Image (spheres, rainbow, N blue to C red):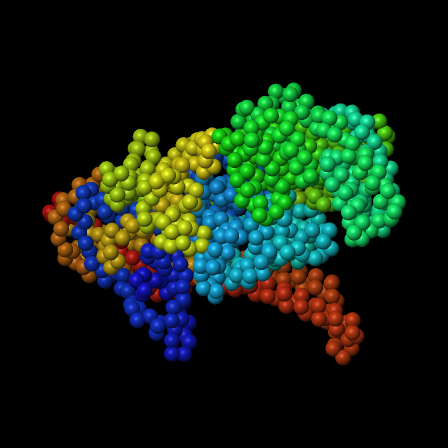
Amino acid sequence: MRGSVWKVQNVEPDGAANFLHCIGLSGITRGKSSIFIDRLEPDLELLDPANLTLIPDTSSNFRQTKLYLEAAFRSAPPATDTPLVLGQAAIDDLAFQHAPVERALSQSRVRLLIADDVGLGKTLEAGLVTSELILRHRADRILVVTTRAMLTQFQREFWTRFSIPLARLDGAAIKRMRNAIPSNYNVFDQFDRAIVSIDTLKKDLQYRVALENSRWDLIIIDEAHNVAARKSAAGSKSQRARLAELLARQTDALLLLTATPHDGSAESFASLIEMLDPTRVPDPASLRREDIEDLVIRRFRSSPEVMSAIRAHVPERVINPRHFPLTPQEDAAYDLVARLELDLDADVNKPGRAIDLFRTTLAKALFSSPAACLETVDGRLRRMKAGTAKGSNKDRQSLEDLASALSVIEPGSFSKYQNLLALLKEIRWTGRDPGDRLVIFSERIATLNWLQAQLSKDLGLAEGAIGKVDGSSVEADERTQKILEDFGQRGSHLRILLASDMASEGLNLHFQSHRLIHFDLPWSLLRFQQRNGRIDRYGQLCKPEFYYFIGESSHERVRDMWVLEKLVAKDEAAQDGIGDPAVFLGAGDIDGEEAIVAEAVARGAGAEAFDAEMDQRAKSTAVEHADNSWDLLFSEYETSSPPPATAVPPPRLYPTTFSFATDMLQTLLPEGTGDLAIDGRERIIRLTLPDELKAIDSFGYTDRGTVDDRYMPPEAVGPGDRIELTDQAGTVTAAINQSRAEDRAWPRLQYLWDAHPLVNWLGDRAEALFAHGTAPLCDVQQGLGEGDIAILVHGAIVDGLGHPAIDRWAVVVFEGEKVSRIEEDVSAFLTGIGFSGDTPNPAQPAPLASSHLLEIAVDRFQSELVKARQAKQAELDEVAKDIRARLAEFKTRFDSQLSLKFGDTADASEQSGSDRLRMSRRAKQQKKIETMFQDWEKWITVSCKLADEPNPHVDIKAVFRRTSHGA
């Protein structure tokens, strides 16, 4: 039908026609699900697998048959539960990073929160899980959602380490696609594998509508804490959270990645669990660890399994405080802020609201820089003058006095800046060494702007040596991505990166830098850890150095405002084994921690008193959670998973992907034409990009004539459309490192392994060596008796989602007219007939005299498949039974919670107005609960039920015989 072979999974009668639910089995339609109306398909033909033409293979060494069969073996989903990718990707093989893959394979539906500590490789763990699902034909459509700053880095990591191409969809790319397709087409249906910023998705209502009508096999939400519920939100949900909930409903598999999976509340943690499986959360405030253990992977740096793996790869860090006296000009300004009493703060001067005081805002700005504080003061004075901000005449005078005090602080009397210059001299930093770059963080954009201008004057660096990323505008996205890329390139002129806290999450800034300077300390332990994690992460080759500044005042009230240094001490305690530093502030999120610090600053608690308060808070938390339920919920999660069942490994004729690729490429593009060069010793393939891998028109993100981004990112293609590939992971890692030494963010060398799209393309071409309706006939000289015939067959049965449930290979061997045996170890059989090495081909074609044996082989193998299906169905029935039992238990708890919250139903005639409102809310919640459990039941019905076919689909892939002329 329509030039392709389709397997009918379900027939839905509809009057005079039937809806055929099909999955593609050949060519570009393989694995694709479609629905056809039979009466509208004039070329619809029911295929008989035994009705095919055998083509004698006369090629040297049976090369065509070997390529054809290898492609068929590789395109078939593996039947084993043993992980396929561990130790295979272009990354260091760390045992603790195996856990997410093993856990995913143990789940009936892949749903995981990967919450490992900062810098432990959550992106790499996600890449391993994604690769595993791709090889198992369970992740054809992939959507990655991340922050704007992380788009390019995440895309590059997935490509260079795992050969997974993701089309980068910024706002401009989506707009181009929308302009290129009919208005009723869904823009997200045009990309099978894409990466997009969550800020891009949330800003346009049309994107939400498009997402509601698109389905994905796998969605990955990076920095998932940004979409979690916040206790400060008082039950309301952010736009990001609502968008994430929508995405969670539109995919079969879901991965959430974050190092901070909660804000100190069970409700925040529960909101992420609800995205994975809402039935696990009857009451968000009473989340139970035993209900969610199979959904969560969480390890700290202090975990023994982590420490043993990374100790040699993450040097011990050094934190250097810089104490210095404030200048008289600064001391005067600080004293004014410490004594400031503003009428405009009267409405918010309440316990717990210090963060809202304008005086607190001024203190925070001054801790950053006089420029930041002056900007804040001037802005308020302008708005007061314009009548758009409140404030009394006394407030105006106080702010004008502060502005005057700030304006006399010149660079020479700005002690923190002068100490920064002194620091650079002390560490002999000149900016000449491209591998010794500085990261300088400040939370205030005004401070970053001031530093950029002043450092350019004082350091005498070349033009373009100082870059700044602050997230101040969406228009700056492309410039920000370019600066972040250049900072990791050894050949770029960048030497200093000035960064706001938009760059504190997820980014790899450690490739050319091991020194990070906190020009102002954040008012949050979590933010401090996030910043440090940009260079203190796996793969850092030098000892990470961190610097921060503490000014010392002659005024006691100013000294009492300095409490931030104690946050650093608590971070050190956490690194030394406490694990989660949230216990010291008890807030769990950045906003909450900043509010607590603001209270201490506002009341002038003093450093020692604040330190004692944090210790007491940690002790109180331990007492409150003496039953361990809280600690258990937020502590590490065990990583053990059931051992995979043993299974026959998938058959192979070629020992490596490299050998298959080179043989197939030599068939398509003979060497000597200039389009192909193979270095067998270095194991490198150099190839001019074939036209079939190029886009045929300017459609959306890809330009006509450039590489089709379904196969690889355009950045991965070298000059002259040349690409280079190797199967040596170490060589790829070296190439990635080398690319940073060149003016090129993407390495020229690509990793050739089973997940590379080129392997799929080569497989499609190899399977076309024998046309549909034909199969190779091979005369062999060993492994069979004289006159014996062996028929290689393949059968597959998928579940209702199109995922492979059974995939079997076998060889049906005939002695004369009778089946003598069925060989299930196909690899051993092929070795026995000499197909594993050089195989002499007598090249004396003759037709198969007993073609009716094909039908017998199909019938016998179908009987075997029926037995396998019955056994698998029994196994799935047990899986469904276990899931339903779990759901029944949770449903009971949901019903109980519903009664506790809304009370029991009452007779309508006896209900008051408030009762009717309460019952209306109860009914709405009840409907939501029923829908949630019905959705799960639908999933069970589809995924745990195999079609009861008496004649499962079978393909005859090859026929082998030993005849007199083959002896």
- The number of callouts visible is 0
Q: Nearer the viewer, residue 847 or 543?
A: 543
Left/right placement of residue 528 relative to residue 199 reads right
Residue 577 placed where, x, y %? 66, 32
Which residue is pictured at 14% across the width and 44% down the height?
842
Can residue 341 be seen here? The reply is: yes
Q: Can you say which quadrant of the picture contains the N terminus? A: bottom left
The residue nearer to you, when weighing 967 against 690, is 690
| Image: 388 above or below 212 | above
Left or right relative to 612: residue 262: left
Q: Position of residue 303 (x, y in %)?
A: 61, 35
- Report the front residue among 872 and 68: 68
The answer to which of 591 and 419 lies nearer the viewer is 419
Q: Is residue 620 visible?
A: no
At x 71%, y 25%, the residue is: 418
Indicate the quadrant where residue 421 lies. Answer: top right
Q: Residue at x 19, y 54 (%)?
A: 55
Residue reaching furthest to the left:
965
- Quadrant assignment for the C terminus: top left
User: Measured from the top left, where is residue 856 in percent x and y?
Assistant: 24, 60
Residue occupying the far right of the picture: 394
* On screen, residue 64 above or below 523: below
Q: Which residue is at a point 82% across and 38% down the rendered structure image? A: 402
Residue 407, image x, y percentages: 77, 34
